[in-house]
Amino acid sequence: MSNEASITPTREVIVRPVRDVDAESLGRVHAQCWHEAYDELISKAALERLSPRRMAELWTHWMNQGPEYMQFAAVLEGEIIGFAGSGPARDEDAPRERELYFINMLAEFRSTGTGQKLFDAAIGDGPAYLWVSSANGRARHFYEKNGFVADGAEHTEPFLGEEIHEVRYVR
């Protein structure tokens, strides 16, 4: 009897810095992540204006901002399944010098530890802050688990021609 039938191949997610050649894949994954994450927060019409090609153009811009801007891709079997980015604080009244700009993952890979790997690559365990949709309980719980607390700041963020209410988290 062969042991091969009982062996399950390990699918390991690799987290690495994004590369110029990733822009198209990142644009496609970014658009899909936003559809999965924001379908309940903004209108279908707004999401239909979201273009993977436009997102790829944004990624090309983000990748070339300089070394203080850090973006990482989670890759499984050669395909990007998620991404994260951080950099200098963008707010005038920023509570920390570093900001986590985004962390997104395809829905099927949530709760697999991949988000934690991306988070650790982008922000580590140092001081930082971030903005998150007040309606995104899953993300808020994740950030709280990583030592962030809501500091009482909130704002409304324009998003695809609509608005999302966000709260600030700080560590």
Image (cartoon, rainbow, N blue to C red):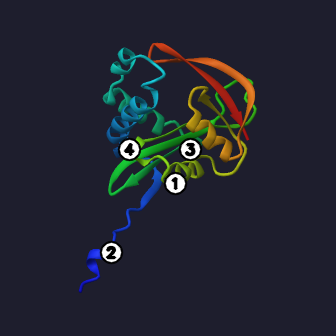
Q: Earlier in the sequence, mark 2 or mark 1?
A: 2
Looking at the image, is mark 1 or mark 3 nearer the viewer?
1
Q: Quadrant of residue 77?
A: bottom left
- Residue that badge 4 annotates: 20
Residue in the image at 49% along x and 52% along y: 114
- Residue that badge 2 annotates: 7
Residue in the image at 39% along x and 47% along y: 81
78 displayed left or right of 101: left
Q: From mark 3 to mark 2, how far is it between C-alphas?
A: 42 Å
Q: From mark 4 to mark 3, how far is it between C-alphas?
A: 14 Å
Query: From the viewer's perspective, is residue 130 above or below residue 157?
Result: below
Query: From the viewer's perspective, is residue 35 above or below residue 125?
Result: above
149 displayed left or right of 161: right
Tag of residue 67: 3
- Residue type marked 3: Pro
CB contact under 8 Å: marks 2 and 1: no
**Residues packed near mark 1 inside 10 Å, few (<14), some (14 to 19) or many (20 plus):** few
Residue in the image at 68% along x and 25% along y: 91
Q: From mark 1 to mark 3, how far is it between C-alphas?
A: 26 Å
Image quarter hosting the C terminus = top right
161 displayed left or right of 127: left
Element at label 3: loop
Visible in this render: residue 101? no
User: Closer to the camera, 47 or 97?
Assistant: 47
Q: From mark 2 to mark 1, how far is it between C-alphas?
A: 22 Å
Looking at the image, is mark 4 or mark 1 nearer the viewer?
1
CB contact under 8 Å: marks 4 and 3: no
Q: Earlier in the sequence, mark 3 or mark 2?
A: 2
Looking at the image, is mark 2 or mark 4 nearer the viewer?
2
CB contact under 8 Å: marks 1 and 3: no
Q: Earlier in the sequence, mark 1 or mark 3?
A: 3
